[in-house]
Amino acid sequence: MHRTGWVLTFLLLTLLVGTLSVGAQKNIVTMSLNQGIGTIDPAKVTDWTEAMVMVNLYDSLVTPKPDGTMAGLIAREWEISPDGLEYVFKLHRGIKFHDGTELKAEDVKFSLERVLALKQGYSWLWADIVKEVVVHDDYTVAFILKEPFSPFLSTLPWLAIVNKDQVLANKKPGNFGEYGDYGQEWLLNNDAGSGAYMFKSWTRGNEIVFTKFDDYFLGWREGAIDEVRAKEIPPGNDATVIAEMRTGALTIADHYRSLETYAQIERLPNASVKTALSGEALYLKINTKKPPMDNVHVRRAISYAFDYQTFIEQIDPGAKQLRGPIPDTIAGHNPNAKMYTQDLAKAREELAKSGYRPGQLTINLCYVDGFELEERLALLFQANMAQIGINVVLQPETWGRITDLAANVETTPHLTAVFSAANYPDPDNYLFTAYHSSAAGTWMSMEWLQDPEIDRLIERSRVEVDPVKRNELFYEIQDRLTDLATDIFIYALPKRYGMQNYLHGFEFVPVMSFEYDFHKMYIKR
Amino acid sequence: MKFADFRRKLAQYWYRFSQNKASIAGLIITVTIVLVTILAPYVTPYPEHAGVFVDFRNTFKPPSSANWFGTDQVGRDIFTRSIFGYRFSLIMAGTVLGIAVPLGVVLGLVSGYFGGWIESLIMRLTDIVLALPPLAMAIAVSAVLGSDLGNTMIALAMIWWTWYARLVHGMVVSLRNEEYVEAAQIMGASKLHIMFREILPNCAPAILVKTTLDAAFVIELSAGLSFLGLGVRPPEPALGTMVAEGARYLPANWWMTVFPALAILVLIFGLNWLADGLRDVLDVDL
């Protein structure tokens, strides 16, 4: 009798819990990440997975539109002084941070100062450019520049606005005087944003979860996503991605999967693939300071020997060969820049001019270990170079190791396959970080070009306010770079995304990770 | 031993060996694979596919009469590459055991025969090295010295000798007081003669059987290492690497994984059956 009573109570409880969880059914979206997340501190964000987190947890003054121009987000409107030195932003009223306090001009000032003080992440975008930030009133803030920097507005999506009071309330002792550690330790595992989503949990090497912020200032539509789970699935595990897309355990397959994987997702009845021509470009960066690549004729020889046609037709069908360093989706691209195509006779001619004989040269090509697209590219390159008598040693390395190798001109390989993402949709994004001498020593600048003429032209383009004159400078830079054959310019990457059919609202934006803005997406079955 | 005696003995061994069908199968498999591997450039349909070669018009072709095992992500024939992949496995097994067996046998003989502090030193060292897991050791060495085949093989050899040192040591300890050893000592034979001519031949059957078994182990381990991307540089074919690469295209392009994996399986089965047969014949208890 006694026992029956317990069993009944248990059954009732189970029923009750069951009903409750049905009542609280949530729209949960799961996406794959091909690589881990290093940090969620918005001042330290660099790669695409970190940026994806930042876009969702934080807001910025402006946000990129699909055509690459900027729309206001926190900023309602803005004015640029005629000399290009002062940017005044008017903010929306009533924007709430996740802790319920209001976002004000002071937070904008603090956010930029924090980034500049920590000198990490995207601080290089503003380090030598912004003189000061002036708060006019709670809803008006001005950025004063040291000298005109024409792409300034398009860099601002990377300035995530953090909650000053909350960060300072959680500071620990540190090197920044009254600011302590600038809340670095606290922001390792917390967010201080006003974004559409709030940080919930993060298991390093596995999964990060964020949940909807109900008081988000832009409001929510029907079918909005309540919870986002992004889990790490390494590039070698595409079979898992396909299996989970089939069962529905995965809603979005990220854009760094193999072509075969997207082809299989496309065949699933419940999912499909979206493709967008991105501003992301693939280069084989040539270390122009390491013999024999310091010889321009060797560089031209390999530029002529590579089989671009096979690559864009067979390895990544639907792609477009790059003409110079800047993809043609970016305004400022030079449509008349020299484009190398495979021509073995010219390649041999250039090799003869270099003074080296066929069979004499051995060069190494470094790429990300296990990244199948780059691996196929490497095997194709190796076979092409064999035709003109250049021996290629393939060097697959982890991405972390490649960034280490890039720090030194001696350790930088002869060639390295690198994708350059569009951080801000402006030619400057592709030129300054790769070719200006002051940017040397990172994975973005493995060319080690250090050419005074290029430096001068880039510097002039950065201060030029007149768009026509700016374009002329860009054209000149592109002509010179292609003539110097500083890279093998392969192609602009068509980005593919696998998605469940019930997910709507996805919109491609040509700035890294801003397409993963879950506030725009919704579920409709 | 006269030649006729030797022949009779061989015939006897063969009779015992051939009683077990699995042993025969093991022998045939092993010999065939070794021969085919040595003659790979002549017996494979597309030997150029093992080197610098791409053909993007023929990627991901399922098994057919032209490509028995299908083709891979850059259009290379998987049958050809599997045969060439055996080279990596066999070179690995040959080199690792080629260094480890003589080293371990000599150390085992010396420590077992001389005893005393020499024995303590060698056997404690053996214990210490035995505590290191071979796979982890090989990965560590590759990480420090760079991942090439030579380093990986040295790393494995530096661990593998311990098994032979221990095996031989144990046998020598029990053999050194046998009457024929004492007889040799009384007749004034040198220590070297006693170790290598009197004792070693009696250990030989056990060493032979263990070497055959270990060949299978090393091949398995080398497949594991190349699966992790250690020891081989593309485009060089290695069975483990082929399995790892193919796994990215599962389940649609199953042939890329299944055939190289089967190739490893067949060789390991062959070696194990062969070792079983040898054990029966030589009457060894390991």
Image (cartoon, coloured by chain):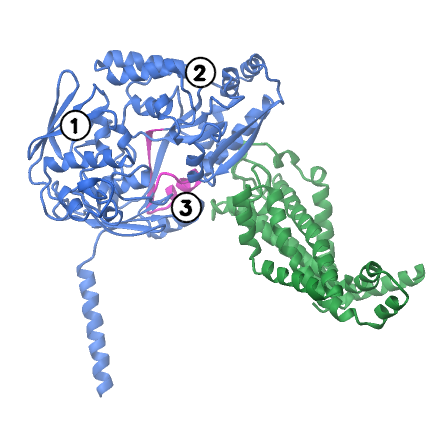
Can you identify the residue that label 1 sits on? Answer: A132
Residues under labels 1 and 3: Cα distance? 42 Å
Q: Chain of mark 2?
A: A
Q: Residues within 10 Å of mark 2 (few under 14, many from 20)?
A: some
Mark 1 / mark 3, whichever is N-terminal:
1
Q: Residue at x 67, y 46 (%)?
A: B91
**Residues marked 1 and 2 touching at CB (< 8 Å):** no
Q: Is residue B89 left or right of residue B175?
A: left
Instruction: Say which colour chain B has.
Output: green
Q: Residues within 10 Å of mark 1 (few under 14, many from 20)?
A: some
Measuring from the top left, give residue B53's x and y in whole percent.
Answer: 58, 32
Q: Residue at x 39, y 47 (%)?
A: A233
Q: What residue occupies the far bottom of the structure in this picture?
A: A1
Measuring from the top left, give residue B94's x and y in whole percent.
Answer: 69, 49
Q: Chain of mark 1?
A: A
Can you identify the residue that label 3 sits on? Answer: A234
Q: Amino acid at mark 3?
A: Pro
Q: Which residues are magenta?
A: A254-280
- Asked if badges 1 and 2 are on one and the same chain, I answer yes
Tell me the number on the disc at residue A484.
2
Mark 1 / mark 2, whichever is N-terminal:
1
Whether residue B171 is visible: yes
Mark in the foreground, 1 or 3: 1
Q: Is residue A172 left or right of residue A301?
A: left
- Does residue A154 show up magenta in the picture? no
Residues under labels 1 and 2: Cα distance? 38 Å
Instruction: Say which colour chain A has.
Output: blue
Mark in the foreground, 1 or 2: 1
Quarter of the image with the N terminus of chain A in it: bottom left
Q: Residue at x 32, y 17 (%)?
A: A458
Q: Amino acid at mark 1?
A: Glu
